[in-house]
């Protein structure tokens, strides 16, 4: 997900792996011009990597890497690259260290595969919104858009509602209301999109991205830059 120069010719590589989750590893001599030290570290592809423990320190050693699932379609379009980069940044800043996250791994793979398609089923930003809300669910901070998180009262589908990203979802007027007001139509499209039954519309993206980023900032260590950058 990221590389940082280290020492004279090494790299510190941040990876999100299926087996170990979020981790960092040293890629020895990866910045060397010698072909035998070359590592494939492009972030939009799925890689097969070989890691081993180092005698001291928390960092693993990256022995080798090769592309297992190339995604050249993402690299051909700037909006797709921005969307993929934003989600990978969110994962890097929120996923727990050295903890396998099966659902989060599946989410990333599905999003990157969707962005790689020749004909997208929705715009990159619309795909980002749905992936971001699913990311919140994977982290345990999913937003309840169907009922008040205080009293449990269901909200009629057609009715606008206040959503408090800090408290985790809708807060009805009887319980004080709070947060951002979402129309009933946007709420229902988002709920259907999370179930794979619809896509959010372009006019839904700005308010949903704002809500998503507010939730990420409230519950994680994420910096408030990803959603703002992609929503402009």
Image: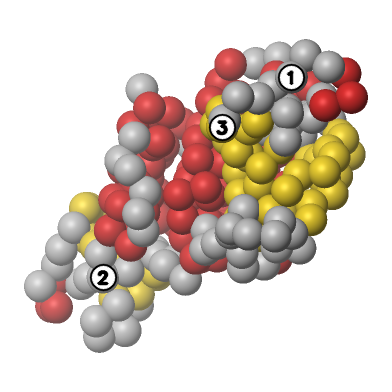
Residue 28 point in image, percent of width and height: 72, 35
Q: Nearer the viewer, residue 40 or 140?
A: 40
Q: What's the mark number on residue 141?
A: none
- Residue pointed to by mark 2: 167
Q: Measure the C-alpha gap from mark 3 to mark 2.
A: 41 Å
Element at label 3: strand
- Is 165 left, or right, of 120 in this rendering? left
Q: Nearer the viewer, mark 3 or mark 2?
A: 3
Residue 120 point in image, percent of width and height: 70, 29
Quadrant containing the C terminus is top left
Which quadrant of the view contains residue 66? top right
Q: Residues within 10 Å of mark 2 (few under 14, many from 20)?
A: some
Which quadrant of the view contains residue 152? bottom left
| Point 36% across, 58% down: residue | 220
Sequence-first tag of 1 and 2: 1
- Is 64 left, or right, of 119 in this rendering? right
Element at label 2: loop
């Amino acid at each position: 997900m990221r590389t940082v120069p280290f020492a004279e010719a090494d790299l510190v590589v941040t990876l999100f792996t299926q087996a170990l989750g979020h981790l960092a590893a040293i890629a020895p001599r990866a910045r060397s011009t010698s072909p035998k030290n070359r590592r494939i570290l492009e972030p939009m592809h799925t890689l097969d990597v070989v890691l081993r423990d180092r005698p001291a320190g928390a960092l693993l050693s990256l022995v080798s890497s090769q592309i297992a699932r190339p995604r050249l379609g993402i690299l051909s379009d700037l909006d797709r690259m921005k969307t993929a980069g934003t989600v990978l940044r969110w994962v890097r800043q929120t996923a727990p260290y050295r903890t396998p996250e099966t659902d989060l791994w599946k989410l990333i793979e599905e999003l990157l595969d969707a962005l790689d398609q020749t004909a997208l089923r929705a715009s990159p930003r619309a795909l980002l919104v749905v992936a971001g809300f699913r990311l919140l669910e994977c982290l345990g901070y999913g937003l309840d858009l169907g009922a008040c998180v205080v009293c449990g009262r269901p909200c009629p589908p057609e009715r606008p509602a206040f959503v408090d990203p800090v408290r985790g979802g809708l807060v009805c007027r009887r319980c004080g209301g709070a947060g951002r007001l979402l129309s009933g139509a946007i709420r229902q499209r988002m709920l259907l999109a999370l179930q794979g039954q619809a896509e959010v519309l372009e006019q839904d993206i700005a308010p949903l991205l704002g809500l998503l980023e507010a939730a990420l900032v409230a519950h994680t260590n994420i910096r408030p830059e990803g959603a703002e950058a992609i929503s402009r």
